[in-house]
Image (spheres, grey):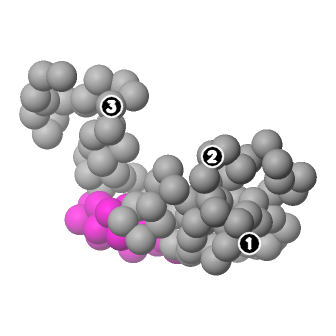
Amino acid sequence: LSATSSTQSPPPGTASSLHWIRRNTCKKVKCPVLAINGEKDTQVLAEKNLGAIKSALDKGRNYRYETKTYPGLNHLFQECETGRADEYGKIEQTLSLDVLSDITFWIRKQLNN
């Protein structure tokens, strides 16, 4: 892979692409943001991801955001044992009702502002 500057996007699918998006794109977002992660997400680590999103939004002076980590949920917001991708097909739950409820509440709150 060739090195990229902070103003160029990295090649799609590279490990640095998510980092680049958080650092360069999130700071340009001016609308309300709900950023959520599953605590057991092994693909996108919750603390690192949400921290980077908060930092980028703050740098862009967008303070209209909420973040939340859901205990016991994986990358697909399902209740799980390990959070690993090989577990996805064994889980019958489509999406945690807590996540769905929180997203619904957040959208309604934005519509009332």
Left or right: residue 29 versus residue 98 is: left
Distance from the alpha carbon under mark 1 to that under mark 3 = 31 Å
What is the quadrant of the N terminus in the image? Answer: top left
Q: In the image shown, does 30 or 42 lie closer to the viewer?
A: 42
Which segment is the magenta one? Answer: 50-66
For residue 26, say whether it is visible: yes
- Residue occupied by mark 2: 85
Distance from the alpha carbon under mark 1 to that under mark 2 = 24 Å
Q: Amino acid at mark 2?
A: Ala
Q: Position of residue 113 (x, y in %)?
A: 64, 72
For the point 42% across and 66% down, the residue is: 50
- Residue occupied by mark 1: 102
Left or right: residue 24 versus residue 47 is: left
- Residue occupied by mark 3: 14
Q: Amino acid at mark 1?
A: Asp
Q: How crowded is the residue under tag 1: few (<14 C-alpha within 10 Å), some, or many (20+)? A: some
Q: Secondary structure at mark 2?
A: helix
CB within 8 Å, label 3 to label 2: no
Q: Earlier in the sequence, mark 1 or mark 3?
A: 3
Q: Position of residue 64 (x, y in %)?
A: 46, 71
Q: How crowded is the residue under tag 3: few (<14 C-alpha within 10 Å), some, or many (20+)? A: few
Q: In the image shown, does 64 or 25 lie closer to the viewer?
A: 25
For the point 63% across and 46% down, the residue is: 85
Q: Position of residue 63 (x, y in %)?
A: 39, 73
For the point 70% across and 59% down, the residue is: 77
CB within 8 Å, label 1 to label 3: no
